Image: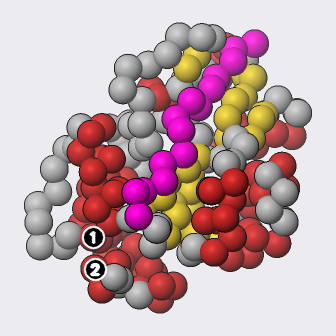
Amino acid sequence: MIISKDEIATFIPERKPRFVILGTMGSICARTINGIKPENAFFYHSNRNHFWKVLQLVCEPNKIPKTFSVDEKVAFLNKWRIAVANIVQEISIKENECNDPSDGILFKAHRGGLLKFKTVSSEFKSILKTAPIFFTCRRKKGIETLLVGYFGVNKLGTDLSTRVWYLPTPTRCNPQKRSSVWNSEIKDHIGYITNIK
């Protein structure tokens, strides 16, 4: 079995977060595999994932999105006061599943008792109880099961999952079109990001 770990620390901005974005687990290229750590691992690290472009277009619609370094990603999240976290710490998988980025691998590991959730700090626990929460894929049973498990392990109450808003995935999409959907749904949930003080 291969041990695949997400060692990306939860990101909490320097000032009170406007909202939280949750994901399942770091990209394959950002995971520690059998003890081998990747360089500069951070959230939404895969080139197939347009998370950073979509978020730039939502927060700064009049600017052309750029490819960020890790330091620039941190500065952007601090500027817009966005907390980001993944919920899965580790999975044990077969060698032939090692490069499969699908959530199905996580669901299978969870059903088999081969998945560990991340534990949260008291600071992040408080944020999760009070801030709007978004998840970076649409609602489906497997994702909800993982969220309930994550909230349960962290003694946050499994009903917290009912407060989560499920955005369409930023993977393999047109960033401009996807940002329009995100902007509309974030507006419906908490108001325009650019208008939040």
Mark 2, residue position: 194
Q: Is residue 11 magenta?
A: yes
Q: Write down the quadrant of residue 195 in the picture.
A: bottom left
Q: Position of residue 58 (x, y in %)?
A: 29, 71
**Residue 81 place in picture, x, y as percent:** 38, 65
Q: Quadrant of the N terminus?
A: top right
Rounded to the nearest whole Å, what is the CA distance between mark 1 and mark 2? 6 Å
Part of the protein shown in magenta: 1-15
Left or right for 103, reference 172: right
59 relative to 182 in the view: left or right: left
Magenta stretch contains residue 142 = no
Circle 1 SS class: helix
Q: Position of residue 76 (x, y in %)?
A: 28, 55
- Mark 1 or 2, nearer chain start: 1
The residue singled out by tag 1 in the image is 59
Marks 1 and 2 in Cβ contact (< 8 Å): yes
Task: Write down the quadrant of residue 159 in the picture.
Answer: bottom right
